[in-house]
Image (cartoon, rainbow, N blue to C red):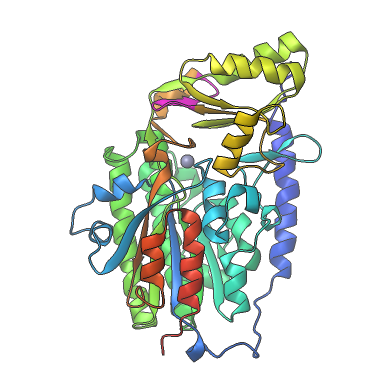
Amino acid sequence: MVRRLRALPLFLVALIVLGQAALVLASSAPAADPAHASPTQLGPTVVVVVLDGCPVGSLDLLPDEAFLGAARRGCDCLSTVVRTVFPSSTAAGHAAIFTGSYPEENGVTGKEYLLADGSPGRFSSPRVLERPTLFEAARAAGYGTAMMSAKKNVRLMLSGAADVSAGADEVPDWILSAAGPPPDESEQYADFAGWHVELDLWVLGTVRAYLESSCAPALIGVNLGSPDKCGHRYGPAPAEETAAAITAMSQGLEALAATLEATRAGNWCLIVTADHGMTQVDKGITVLDIIDEVAESTGSEITATLDGGVLYVWAEGEAQDELAKALAGTEGVAEVIGPDGPGGAKDQARRAELRIRHPRTAPLIAVVQSGHMFIESPLFMDYTHGSHGTADLDSDVLVPLIICGPQARNGKAQQLLSAAQSVTDIYGIVMDLLNSPSN
Ligand SMILES: [Zn+2]
């Protein structure tokens, strides 16, 4: 067997990365610098909510009575559609939103990258980010900062400059007593959709606890995972469980808006977006078989990361050539992108267009056609009906950008929102709001 066994290295990598993240978190005490502007000179509290895996089309299915349905239609809110980055997946999308930059600039190139020892590692530490985050900018301006997340790796990656960082696995005691305990992990498979909705509502409860603890202006990042979890399992809305999760998120955000108004009347902004969308799939491409064949026939070691609509492969020489050919001839594969080198002008141009020219990006990338996904085993298709990751499918890449609240039209926000094309434009909008004192 020449393909890498992934379980053990990943486990070790997780230990190492978590250790590093803990060090970073421990050393990042709140910066209470009296030299910074007093709260009255700061702008509004801004909450940036990422609905994980929620394509804009899913919000459009909500009725007018729903908070997010009305918001999408521009009632009392500003609303537009933006594109996420490639690959359209969780780590890359969050890094793009919170650093305002593309994978080639911020270094978050997908689900995994090769560590120095050649094993794949996850993007789960602030150290992977090569651009400053909104949290750093907000903290430097004197804002409180907080990151609350249903997904652990997202929280770990983005909490480098967060005064408060909360998730089910790690929550400060004072938030725990105010918001109560997160749902019991041992119960998550009894009612899969309901459990993930409950977790998200608990995450929103931690945000409310933070807002109620202090009226000082803050920048808060939030990740809500149930649209993604349900989208993968049941398919995107209108699949019943996924639509119900999104409706529950709409209600939860309506309650959050009420808390914002109760704690800082007239002086807040709620931004709602998504890291990527979700596409209905019914055909799995069992790509490990193909990789094993090439690894055996060429006698080489190949490392691969499967991420739904996209496949990253680290292979060299003959193995790379053989695998590129095999993948290009595989049913359901839309595109194979070769290495970034002088030999392949077309591949180089495609990488430049997708803005993924970074040493962490794999030399070989394959992208699926609609309805397909890369999968370890055909068995997984029995309980997988949604996927994402591609560069071009609208359902994967088109996400909502909504700004609600009494300060939504503060500064140049409206102008910036109408010009916004990409999730990377959110950074500039938030910075403008934070730099626009309301009185
Ligand atoms: Zn996902």
* Residue 126 position in % (x across, y down): 67, 57
* Residue 4 position in % (x across, y down): 72, 25
> Is residue 19 in view?
yes
Residue placed most toward the observer, 134 or 378 = 134
Residue placed most toward the observer, 203 or 308 = 308
Residues rendered magenta in the picture: 368-377
The residue lying at 47 percent from left, 15 percent from top is 331
Residue found at the far right of this picture = 117
Q: Main secondary structure of the magenta part?
A: loop
In the rendered image of this protein, does residue 29 appear above or below residue 339?
Answer: below
Q: What is the quadrant of the N terminus in the image? A: top right
Q: Say left or right for 284 vs 193.
A: right
Q: What is the quadrant of the C terminus in the image? A: bottom left
Residue 118: quadrant of the picture: top right
Residue 369 among those drawn in magenta: yes
* Residue 260 position in % (x across, y down): 37, 75
Residue placed most toward the observer, 371 or 250 = 371
> Is residue 195 in view?
no
Task: Say how many tags the image has.
Answer: 0
Q: Say left or right for 243 vs 9.
A: left
Residue 86 among those drawn in magenta: no
The residue lying at 61 percent from left, 62 percent from top is 159
Residue 172: quadrant of the picture: bottom right
The residue lying at 39 percent from left, 72 percent from top is 269
* Residue 318 position in % (x across, y down): 74, 16
In the rendered image of this protein, does residue 212 appear above or below residue 325?
Answer: below
In the rendered image of this protein, does residue 184 appear above or below residue 237?
Answer: below
